[in-house]
Structure formats: C-alpha cells, structure tokens
Image (cartoon, rainbow, N blue to C red):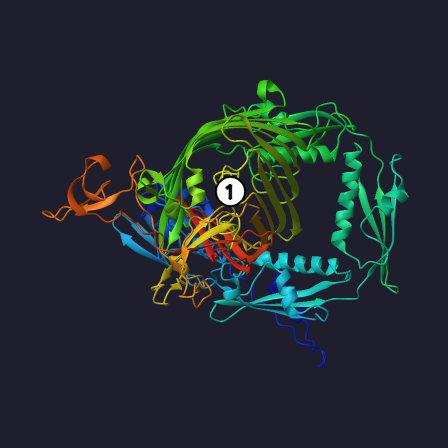
Amino acid sequence: MLSGLAHAQTAPAQTPPAAAPQTAVAPPAPVQEVRTIRSIRVEGSQRLEPETVLSYTRLRVGDSFTNETVDQAIKDLLASELLADVSIDTTGGDLVIKVRENPVINRVIYEGNKRLKNDKIQKEVKLAPRQIFTRTAVRADVARIIELYRRQGRFAARIEPKMVSLDQNRVDVIFEITEGPKSKVRQINIIGNEVFSDGKLRGEMATKTAGLAHLLSSNTSYDQDRLAYDQQKLRQFYLTEGYADFRVISAVAELTPDKRDFIITYVVEEGPRYKFGPVKVDSAIRDFDDKRLASALSIKEGQWYNAKAVEDTVEQLSETAGAFGYAFADVTPQFERDREKLTMSMNFNIGESNRTYIERIEITGNRQTQDKVIRREFRVAEGDAFNTFLVKRSQDRINSLGYFQDKFEIERAEGSAPDRIVLKANVEERPNGELTLSAGFSSLERFILQASIRQRNFRGMGQTVSASVDYSSYSKSVELGFTEPYLFDTNIALGGTVFRQDYNAFNYIGSDRSTTYSQVATGFQLVAGLPLTEYWTLSGRYTLRQDDVTLDKDSFYTNGVCDPTKAGRYYCEAVGNRITSLVGLSLIYDSLNSRLRPTRGQRLSIGTDFAGLGGDVKYVRARAEGDKYWNVGSGFIFSVSAEGGYIHSLEKSKTAGSDPVRITDRFYLGEPQFRGFDIRGVGPRVQRIGFTGDPLAGTQALITDRDQIIDDALGGKAYYLTKAELEIPLGAGAAEMGLRPSIFVMAGSLFGITRPGKTIEFTQATDSAGKLLFNADGSPTLLPKDNFQKDASGNQLYVFTDPTTGVSTSTPCSVGFGTSPTACTGTSINPIYNIQTAPFYERFLGDSARPRISVGFGVNWNSPFGPLRIDVAKTLVTVDGDDTKLVTFNVGTQF
C-alpha cells in the first residue's frame, strides 16, 4: 500500500513548489517466508530428554514457523539456563535443534577466606554441588560474597571465580578470595559548625576514626547504617543544647582510591539557640491538678531548650499517671516556637483515660522455674489497680533473682475491656547450675585450686544449694550451704552453712613469706531474714565456731613455751583453743535494681553481733555499710560506698599492755578491700628492727632495709572505708570482650587498740660515768639480753662438755655432771647455760584514725582464663608503718 500510495501521488505530471521539503519514504519490509514444521529432532542432549528441551519452546510439528519464531525459540532455550549453546537448522521444514548442555557442579571451593568461614558464605550463595552451572549464577554469587565482606567493612575484597572442567560434563567452581584489610574511617570532616568544635561533635558519634585512641573500638570501620545513626546522634545532641532548628544538610562517605579508607564529610546548619517559654500541663484526667503538675516538672521557663528533658518529662508524667492507675494515659507535648524571641513554649496534654486494673498476669517461658517463684516477686496482684511504680519494682526484683535473661522487662497489653490491662512476664531461663573446677594465681594466695558446685534455683523453687573446696599455699576451706528464700511459702528466708577453714597468717622477711600463726576454724552458721517493708529487711544469725590458734613450736617456742622474743607477745597471747557462740542482728535497706550488677539504687546495712552466749569469747561488735549507684548516662555508672565497724571486749585484759580483744577477732584492712595497700597493710602494727655492728665498739646501727624488718599487723578495734568509683563504658568491641574499666578514689583507716607493752627489755649501754648511750640514728645502744636456761624443776642449767668426745650437753650441776643437783659427779667447772637474745628495737606504728587516701584505675575482664581484676592505685596519704602496693590482680581459669 505504501508503494501504491507513492505511485498515485507521483502520477500527475506536476512539479511541487521549490520550497516544499523532500520527504524520504521507508523501503518496504521484506516479506518473511512462512513454512510448516514437518519434524523436530534434538541433538547433543545428554542428561536432558528431548521432550524436556522441546518443552521450553513453542515449536510443534504441523505448526507454521518463520525466522523470528526460530530466533525466539533459541532465546527461550538459553533463558532456561540449562544449556550453554543452542542452534536450530531449518532445512526443508525439518528442524534440528543442536544443544550443548551446561555442566553440572561437582564442588564449590572457597580459597583465601580467613575472616569469613565457609559456612557463613554457603548460607548466602546459590551455587551448590549437583546444580547446573551458569555464568549468570556465578556473577550473582560473586556479588553476594562481596556484599558479605562489605558488611564487615572490607570494601577492598576481590573475588575471582574460576572453573575447572571434569569428565562427564562436570566442573569444579573455585572462588579465589582476596579479603583485603578492613576499610577504616580515616577522617571525619564537619562543615558549618561554629558553636561546637569538630572534636566535640565527633565524640557524640558512634563512628570513630582509626588510631591508637580507638584501638579497641569496633566502630572504626565504615557502616552505612551507622552513618545514618550518627546523623541522628548529631541532631539529638544539638536538640539537647537548645538548637531546635539544627539539621544535617548532607553526609557523604568517599572511599579512597586504594579502597582502604573512608573520608566522611558532614555539612550542618546549627541555627539559633532557644530557651523554654512558658511550661504548662493540660490534663483531661480530673484527679490531676494542672498547676501542681506543672510546678513539679524539672523543666522551667528560661532554661535552655532540651529535647531530652522534654522526653523525660513525658515519661515522668506517664509514670505519675501510671502510679495513680492510669496505665494508658496519653501524654502529648505541644511545641510553640517563637523565632523572634527564640523561645519554645511547652504544653503537655494528658488525654482522658480510664483508671486501669490488672486483669491477669501471664508468665511464659519458664520450663524449670515454678510459677510461684516468679509470682511472689510481683508487687501487684491480679485485680489490683495498675501502678507503674510497683510494676517497675516487680521487674527489678525478678531481675535480681539472676535466673533469667539480662534486661528482663514486664510487657503490658490491653485487656478484655478499656479499663483492663494484662501484664506479661516472658522469661528466658539461663543455666543456674554451676560446676566449677578452677586453678589460678593470686597476688594474695599465690597458687589456688578451687572446686565448687552450686544450684541457685534448686528444683525450680528458688532454693540455693552449694558446696565448695578451696586450697592454696596458705589457706584451705570446705563449706556446705543451703538457703530457702520462702520458708513454708511464707516471706521468711532461712539458710545455713557448715564450714571448716584453715588459715595461715604471715609476714614477709625480705621476699620470703613467713607463716606466723595458724588458725583452724570449724563451725556452722544459721541466717534468717524477715522483710519488714518492701525495702527494709530484718536479718538474724547465730554462729557457733571453734578456733584453734597455734604457732610453730620449732620456730616460736623455747623450752616448750611460746617465746615472745620470737613470736611477739600478741601472737603468744592468741595461742589456744576457744569456742565462740555468737548471735547477730542486722537491719537492711535495699532498693538496688539488681543484686548482681547494680546500676541504680542504694543499699544500707546496720548490724551488731554479741559473742558470749556460752563459749570462751565475749565481745560486742557493730558494723554498718552502704552503697549507692547512679546511672549518669551514656553507659557511665557512678557509685559511692562506705563501711565501718567497732568491736568492744566484755573481758578485761589479763596482763598489762595487752588488749582484751584478741588478735583473731579484730578488724583488718588492706588488699583487696583497700586498693593501693598490701594485705593487712593499713593500721596498727609492731615492727621489730635488728641492729648491725658492735654496741661496745660504738658501731651499732639500726637495719634500714624494710625487707629485713619483721612487720606484724595487729588489726584494730575500729575502722572505716569509703570509695567513689566511676565505671567507664567502652566500644562494642571491648564490651564483647567483657572489659569494664573504672576510676576510683578511696579513703579509710584502721585504729583503736591498746598500745602493746614491749616484748622484752634490753639493757641500755652506758659510758664509764654511767650515762646512757645512743646510736648515731638516735636509737638507744642496746646490749644482748641474758636468757639463763632452767630445767622443768626450776634448777639453773649449766653446759657440761665431755673431755673424751667433746660433746656438750646441759646439766643442773655447776661442777661435774648429773641429772639433778644432788647427783653430780666429777670435778669440771661448768659455765652457765645462757642463750643471749640479740638486741632489737621494737616500735608501735599505724594506730591513727587519720584517713589514708588512694586513687587509681582498674579493669574487670572476663578473660579466656576466667574473671580477671587488675588495679593500679597510687597512695596520696599514708601513715608511718603502712604497706603500699601499686598493682594488684586476681585471676583464675576454668577447665
């Protein structure tokens, strides 16, 4: 028709105007030959049946076909991804489809992947053994693997796929992986900030620049989601500082050409700073007084605008409404911005709401723990009016059990009516049985072995059963315990322990640890607790124990009697076997949100013990301690603690210069309670300092080497200890490692005992005129002390030397030899048996209530070797005699 139309137009013998444009006419489309399919044959297929190949085409015997029909059939067959190559021969209407099948995958191999294990990659890729190999699938899997590495921050990762042909049309697919380093954030630029410095704003972001300052942080790698989060963090920061118009204009992350680092650039607009205008409360709940609510709010007119304070106020009003039973009160803040006066007026609307009652309490997820163990921790019951304060308290009490997941929360759901609410406790039980075999090294106990078994939720009833055995070079103990927190389903706790403790006290002579006295304690303790109110508890206890204090006779005894010149009179006085019958009472206030790792709340305990209901020991002891925790935001936990005690004996001193409170009953202070000081390093002590030189020659001088001075801690009758500590949060990487660092300052003292009398009096040397002599250092010049030996009957002993053997032995005979003064034979004149005691200077130190002060930092680490605590503390204030220590640590391991 197109040709006919053109012929008709040019038929008249007319010439178009010269100005008329010339129009090109398309040549006629070629007419395709239409043929009929007489037969179809498939060649080259091995695994695939010919019918399967034909099923992917529209070619059928008897149908007509053209070249376009054949081309479409080839495309359809290739699209099936079963075939690597396809051609169709159409000679004479007999179609021959020649195919070459895609190979089958024999194995998929990953090489070079160290940071991503095979199992993680295999979850994402599609290629697998016995599947059909296609290049499209390979390209898709390469993209998926690269995306996996990008999620890890490895933008330089490269994947090179290779194919190894095998027999029977099989292939091995090999992904050669070059992981490359993590692409770190090299630099963060901020443009447009005038009020706050770049460093201040970077500190608010989660993303950190790579460097030594953030060595342990996992946030130095680039993360697109974190980039969006940081923009929100910047906005939140400015909104808390009063910049209500702040906005991030753009945030661009540029990858360096080597794909190793990112440079992030923020463009911000700070805007003006606003103050709060009038602050009002408009409540539709009739029980509330709008003006009183507004006056009780923390935000006031004239303060700098703070979006966080607005959120806290909404939460405060919601909690207030909840405390009065309005669980679903809707608190909506309305903002009125005055751009001229730069004020932000606030109106908090409290929507109309019905008083809410608890329809039911649902407990799910507890497979072992009985329902009643959880329900008894609830401070509200079904049918009670809803109270947010009591629900929060219930949540804290369940968390303190330690039986369930961290950060357990009680969920709220609407009930069957608008005034009904359902409380849901969906718990996730954690293992509460502990079987521990541990070995370690302690700066206090040296090598330690420990075995313990404890079940903190025995039979799912909240009972605690425990048994432990501890062994170290200087202490040993065995203890069995049982606690029933709700005796006969009443709110009374009852527990008891049976113990055997073997402790060796010690001091240091140089670098050698020398055991002084050994104390073996055997007994039991019963403890009962009765809650008085929600936070106050009355606790009573009874302890019966036998203490056997001994000294090594070879080291500290002379003639079968404890020798004060060797042991010190205070240790000799402690020797003996005594029974202590003690009853105690404590009043405890506890509002901590968790007993395991508190972050807010406080605990106060005041107690007294009376020993004297039978037994051999009589004293009254009082102790008080308190802790308070604040969550100061951003993961920082601040805490203060204080404790103190006093013990008063109800017995009189048996000898002058001794204290009626025995050395084993006194308080002691030092490592580990008081960081910066050695074990028993604070408080009263007696030092015995030897001399060098000859007193008669005038060369006598006190030993000045502290390691050569015998230093015996005496303990005290009164003590106090205070501490302020700030726990510092680290990055996510450090948190995953279990690192919790803190800084602290401590102050305390131990004091209040009777000044001990001298262990032994030495003769002070005099000159020819009878004037007392002193050494150059001011100490008195002392002469050795005569110690004439006597036998059991009180007879003076002498030294007899056998003239034939030269062997010396003791005898009561001044002349000759015999076993008694009346049975002496011989004519030898014997010298007196005299063991002179070398002179030493004894001084009493440390009995002062003056506070000792230390500052330092420490870190708790859940290391692969077990819990580890390291403290570095510097003492700022000490008293003469105190033993300081810069670094202390404790570590153990489980196996």
Q: Quadrant of the N terminus?
A: bottom right
Please indicate, yes or no, whether residue 327 appears anywhere in the rendered image.
yes
Please name the residue shown 72% across and 81% down the image. 19
Q: Is residue 402 above or below residue 296?
A: above
Q: Quadrant of residue 489?
A: top right
Viewer-nearest residue: 593 or 516: 516
Q: Is residue 390 left or right of residue 74?
A: right
Q: Residue furthest bottom?
A: 18
Q: Residues within 10 Å of mark 1 (few under 14, many from 20)?
A: few
Percent across and percent down for residue 11 are 66, 70
Three-letter amino acid code of the residue under disc 1: Ala
Q: Is residue 240 above or below residue 356?
A: below
Dot 1 falls on a residue whose secondary structure is loop
Q: Residue furthest left?
A: 804
Please indicate, yes or no, whether residue 737 appears anywhere in the rendered image.
no
Please name the residue shown 52% across and 51% down the image. 682
Percent across and percent down for residue 360 are 69, 24
Q: Quadrant of the C terminus?
A: top left
Viewer-nearest residue: 75 or 613: 613
Please name the residue shown 80% across and 33% down the image. 324
Viewer-nearest residue: 359 or 177: 359
Percent across and percent down for residue 782 are 40, 59
Percent across and percent down for residue 417 are 77, 26
Number of marks in the image?
1
Viewer-nearest residue: 602 or 654: 654
Which residue position is annotated with label 1?
656
